[in-house]
Amino acid sequence: MADASAPARLSAPAQALRRLGLLRDVDLALHLPLRYEDETRLTPIAGLREGEAAQVEGQVVDCRVEQRTRRQLLVRLRDDAGGELLLRFLHFHAAQQKQMAEGARLRVRGEARVGFLGREMVHPTVKPVAADAPLPQALTPVYPAAAQLPQAYLRKAITSALGRVSLHEVLPPGTAPAGLPGLRDAVRLLHQPPPQADQRSLQERSHPAWQRLKWEELLAQQLSQLQAQQARARLRAPALRAAADGLGARLLQRLPFALTAAQTRVVAEIAADLGRQQPMHRLLQGDVGSGKTVVAALAAAAAIHAGWQCALMAPTEILAEQHFRKLVDWLAPLGLTVAWLSGSRKGKARAQMLEQVAGGEAALVVGTHAVIQHDVAFHKLGLAIVDEQHRFGVAQRLALRHKLEGEKLEPHLLMMSATPIPRTLAMTYFADLDVSTIDELPPGRTPVLTKVFADGRREQVMLRIRDELAAGRQVYWVCPLVEESEHLDLQNATATHAELSQALPGVMVGLLHGRMPAAEKAAVMSLFTQGQMKLLVATTVIEVGVDVPNASLMVVEHAERFGLAQLHQLRGRVGRGSAASVCVLLYAAPLSATAKARLKAMVETHDGFEIARRDLEIRGPGEFMGARQSGDALLRFADLQQDGALLQHARAAAPRLLAEHPAAAQAQVDRWLAGRAEFLKA
């Protein structure tokens, strides 16, 4: 027997609304149209133009199912002026056929074309109407939707919500930019534009109503960042002051290289932050190979010298292990214990490591997301370092910050990224972050020549591989998939490994992908790093962290399927030694405009900041920042490329509003961010 107290099961459309996050009336009111259809006017059938969308009305004079090359529903419609139009349906059901029976009056919208039987529309939108049914007085909105969420249901839900929601002004008069409509008027116009509205400016989101919504959103985002900044200012962290003769100084003396001027500047910025009692919240960004790991090691040394522990978290075991090996080489001779934690470490070895971490014997803990699991307890965590921070979900980064248990203190947080962030994004997404930039590469790095080949030129690539191997060099070959896919006709790592092994007898060809057991991955990487394995076929698990100076050739299969930042990271795996290095991007035709833009950028520049700027142009800020990792894009309407003036106005207004009208500022954040503000703090 069903539980009478259980809540009624939601309908499929209602569940779809929830999945879209449309829970409150204000959420529905701010769910704005993608585009509009003009159903406010009728076109005589005789006046239809080929290729143009239009709406007609008439009576069905014939409705039949015919078996041609396939079964089709053909409906002939005649309007009051005598013009006739054929409606063709290749997919239909009995209810539709009944709805369009002979004698029915229909209002039909679609794209007209001229066929063998005269004017026709294929799969138009059909609505049965009475002879005197009035036309709508506003353009018909088409909303972003989801599976099992019909437009009609969504329109009805939004219209109902607009009738209930107040959308009153929460901001003091004069806060918004001059010349823009009020919020209520702007929202209602965007949902129900009058027929005479400028459809082009609505579509391009340059209409004053759109400008008001974008500014409101940017203001809420900037306010939330400032609130996070103020909240952080109230927190306390251990002051980790470096001594002139401390661990950091001893580590610098032992390093086999000198720091660049950029590294020295960044180390000083981090040291100043660590010496304060306010938690550091700093992003360290630098191009591939700019030397971020040694900066992280010096920060860790400062924390450890002050009597606190440090944790370094990386997204993959390969990258985490690369950091672990380097840090052990640098720090173990100074008498420090470096612990290793990953998902693959089990049993007694893991228990022993956990004991060292909890007891404080392990000064530095390196690992994957295993570092933030519930059974990992730190003795005194003073500094958390997150590498490739965009690869972690926001909740994971927050969890690492909460690992300082039993103290009324927060650990300092240093995030690192080899995907440089353009200034406009740093201003907007990272207003609560201090940003340090390593903007020069260490001396001796060899520029990598990038070549783009169609996959029909694989033989030329094979000749180049043979030349590199004959010269004693090593080669990467990167594939996008591990196994055959029915959906994507891509070369996969397993098949490529077999092909290259056969083509290069006597050469050790390795295979590396994410589904291999950790021990097997480690064994393969060890053979390649030591130079015994000459050619490594891999998926993107080698994207970051792999450092083999003898590797001088990188081949990327189906390069058109990779993102620009990924391609730049992959290219950074070669050019780490003294030999001239080449990155070959193999592509399968035809190329989309986006893929062409990516490959062109790779050939034209090696500058990570220029790569980031072009990536932003191609992908837009939401994808560039990996905003989807939190489940929500932080900006839905504003476009940082186009809306710079609105952003500057919002940045200027936010501090005044927070200082002079804190209740209004909070109401603005509540209305727009609906619980997502926490994600801005990570």
Image (spheres, rainbow, N blue to C red):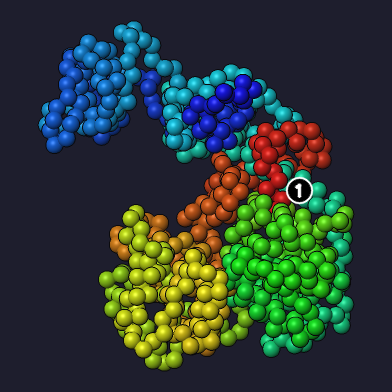
**View extreme (front): residue:** 1
Residue at 74% x, 61% y is 376
Q: Is residue 438 left or right of residue 155?
A: right
Residue at 37% x, 83% y is 465
Does dot 1 land on a helix, a strand or a loop?
Answer: helix
Confirm whether residue 24 shows in the render: yes
Q: In this view, does 421 lie to the left or right of 122?
A: right
Q: Picture coordinates of residue 243 (x, y %)?
A: 88, 77
Q: Give the position of the N terminus as an image quadrant.
A: top right
**View extreme (top): residue:** 132
Q: Is residue 8 left or right of residue 359?
A: left
Residue at 80% x, 83% y is 335
Confirm whether residue 46 shows in the render: no
Kind of residue indicated by mark 1: Ala
Label 1: few (<14), some or many (≥20) within 10 Å? many
**View extreme (bottom): residue:** 471
Q: Nearer the viewer, residue 589 or 368?
A: 368
* Total numbered badges shown on the rendered structure: 1
Residue underneath mark 1: 228
Q: In this view, does 149 lie above or below 443?
A: above
Q: Picture coordinates of residue 466 (x, y %)?
A: 35, 86
Q: In this view, does 527 lie to the left or right of 371?
A: left
